[in-house]
Amino acid sequence: MATTRRIAIFPGSFDPPTLGHLDLIQRGARLFDVLVVALLRNTSKQPMFSLEERAEMLRGISAGTPGVEVDVFDGLLVEYARRRGATAVVRGVRNSADLGYELELAGTNRHLDPFIETIFLAPAGQYAHISSTLVREIASLGGPVRGLVPPAVEPFIEDRRHPGRVTRV
Ligand code: PNS
């Protein structure tokens, strides 16, 4: 009997990926056959890390999790999800402040394509306070980011502080 692969998209800016993102990648990967971590190419925000750096960081942190792919997308998320054959979008909700925006996003995506379901996942409690915005702020002020980002992301932050001094492997 033919089986259908369940594919979900985990979209975002990932500037940079955090331990919270990694926790959600691992949770999402357990629920679907394929979880596509999809990096938005064009955003109005001026990112701290280039698209290539963010893709490299995401590949590095998700390498040990089976069923995870990293990709870059442009344009409407639902159109990308359809092209990939995905039936779901995974989004993380850390607290009630996230929920309003996430419901708006989910409602808009449902309006655009009622067949793509949004699944909200809560990260583990110890990651609920972590955001890429605060990591960028700490990084730009020279503070420690250990315990906020996966170890594979730390050299990228260090490299931004002292360009050329750190060799990534
Ligand atoms: O990590 P972020 O910045 O919260 O991710 C936001 C993202 C990438 C999920 C959202 O901006 C998005 O899906 N953009 C693609 C354009 C789109 O489909 N917009 C209509 C839905 S509101």
Image (cartoon, rainbow, N blue to C red):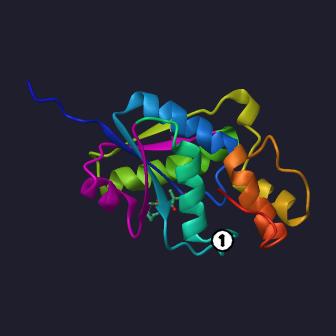
Residue 134 appears in the figure: yes
Residue 31 vertical position relative to residue 79 in the rendered view, above or below? above
**Residue type at the position of mark 1:** Pro
Across and down, in percent, residue 91 comes to: 51, 44
**Segment colored magenta:** 67-93
Quick one: quadrant of the N terminus? Answer: top left
Relative side of 125 to 86, left or right: right
Q: Position of residue 140 (x, y in %)?
A: 85, 66
Q: Residue lying furthest top in this view?
A: 1
| Residue 71 located left or right of residue 160 | left
Q: Secondary structure at mark 1?
A: loop
**Percent from the top left, x then y, of residue 104?**
51, 52
Give how far across and how far down residue 142 sits, in percent.
91, 62
Residue hosting label 1: 47
Quarter of image, res 165: bottom right
In front here: 135 or 96? 135
Residue at 91% over, 64% down: 141
Residue 157's place in the image compared with 41, above or below, is above
Classify the position of the C terminus by image quarter.
bottom right
Does 53 appear in magenta? no
